[in-house]
Image (cartoon, grey):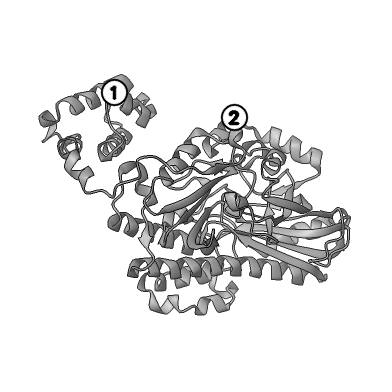
Amino acid sequence: MENKRINGDDLIAIGYKENEALGEALKINKKRLGYNREEMLNMFKNVLENPNDFLTDPNFSKLSHLLLNIELIEKDKIALKTDPQAYEVYGVENIEEGAKKQMQTAMKLPVTVAGALMPDAHQGYGLPIGGVLATNNAVIPYGVGVDIGCRMALSIFDLPADYLETNRDDLKNILLNSSRFGAGNGFLKHERIDHEVLENNQFQENPFVKQLKDKAWTQLGSSGGGNHFVEFGRMEFAQDDAELGIPKGTYLALLTHSGSRGLGAMIANHYTKLAMEICKLPYEAKHLAYFDLNSAEGQEYWLAMNLAGDYASACHEVIHQKVFNALGAERLAMVENHHNFAWKEQWKGEELIVHRKGATPAAKGVLGIIPGSMAAPGFLVRGKGEEKAIQSASHGAGRLMSRTQAKKVISKSEVNAILQDLGITLIGADLDEAPMAYKNIHEVMDAQKDLVETVATFHPKIVRMADDGSRED
């Protein structure tokens, strides 16, 4: 039905303001009340101009009440700064307007001190993906994101790169046996393993988190859906790396990407809802609702967020240990970093809360991993500590297409041709994770050469992802 194409810009064009009434109108539009697009827009215009006529209408009464009381409702909101603070943008030419608009809104928060937008940035909820925001003693659940503590982990093995070709079937089976994929998926009771993360005090002290312990145990060591993966590849060091103790050469490596699964998602949703009840922001900024870290709710979320981060790390640890045991090879090094998190950090001599929603910590000398796509290289990097970027870098290539668009315009035969040409074996994944759905990783890396230096390059060769392209709830 045509009315589904009505969006916020359409309603603003007929006179609606960016406030609660606009949000209610968009909710009504989703119900598809039997009107075509033009009729629906006329109805919205009539309600806007004559709200008293719709006070008892079964479909538009709530909207009419909001319109009549909008000034009083807006008066009770926390005021934003009139103008957004300036912030650094890297790779600006490849960042969509929606992401920039979200960042500008974040820069108007009364608690905001500094911000930066990474070159892989794209629109999300609240803070854009690729957004970095430093605040004064405040934590924003949607500034952290739903997949709390999502991270990269890299193991480099003392095996030559040609091991990939001579043992491809064995390596494929190792990936199939090392984890479980897909939203909601986990392990049966007799398959579960114990880990010290399950003894975290939060599972006893926080009533909400306590009820999630069994889910956490079930999914410990699993990988989730969406863009999460476990993959073998060729790791190239162009020169000796003294810090890691790895000589110049090419090695077999394991790269994983996943987060805190259902545990993190449920913590994020619960505390985002609570923050929005406590912190009443204007409509345009409502998803940036925050907790004061001195409040009981702020402390509760902070501890739960850290638990989710530790849990995500434990999931990677379990997967890498399974692969390590199956390979029976020496591990030369393991590197891990997370994004979708908030840290207490010093910035210009002041302690701030730094949110990195899809951004890699890149303090001077700090190692991190920035992946490309299933068909593009990833990079082991060392941070340069750039102050203007709030010591951050991108967390990947960043999406070029939405998942819906990718499924519409990309064919399986196109993807298969690319993978075959590059000698990549793919297990699982849907078209929304196709290489063409992502930005050019080389352009992204070029845009952040002042933020990180490349230590080594990872070329994916056997890639395992969720079979159904599912995403975490």
**Mark sitting earlier along the chain (2/1):** 1
Which secondary structure, mark 2? helix
Which amino acid lies under the numbered mark 2 shown in the image of this protein? Val
The numbered mark at residue 460 is: none
Depth check: 260 or 137 in front? Answer: 137
Q: In the figure, is residue 217 to the left or right of 210?
A: right
Q: Residue at x 14, y 30 (%)?
A: 51
Q: Residue at x 20, y 36 (%)?
A: 63
Which image quadrant: the N terminus? top left
Depth check: 61 or 326 in front? Answer: 61
Furthest-front residue in this view: 349
Q: Does the rendering let one see residue 145?
A: no
Circle 2 Cα neighbour tier, 10 Å, few/some/many (<14 / 14–19 / ≥20): few
Depth check: 292 or 308 in front? Answer: 292
Task: Give the image location of residue 170, x and y in percent.
Answer: 80, 60
The numbered mark at residue 409 is: 2
Task: Give the image location of residue 179, x and y in percent.
Answer: 64, 63
Circle 1 Cα neighbour tier, 10 Å, few/some/many (<14 / 14–19 / ≥20): few
Q: In the figure, is residue 244 to the left or right of 414?
A: right
Depth check: 190 or 194 in front? Answer: 194
Which residue in the protein does label 1 denote?
Answer: 14
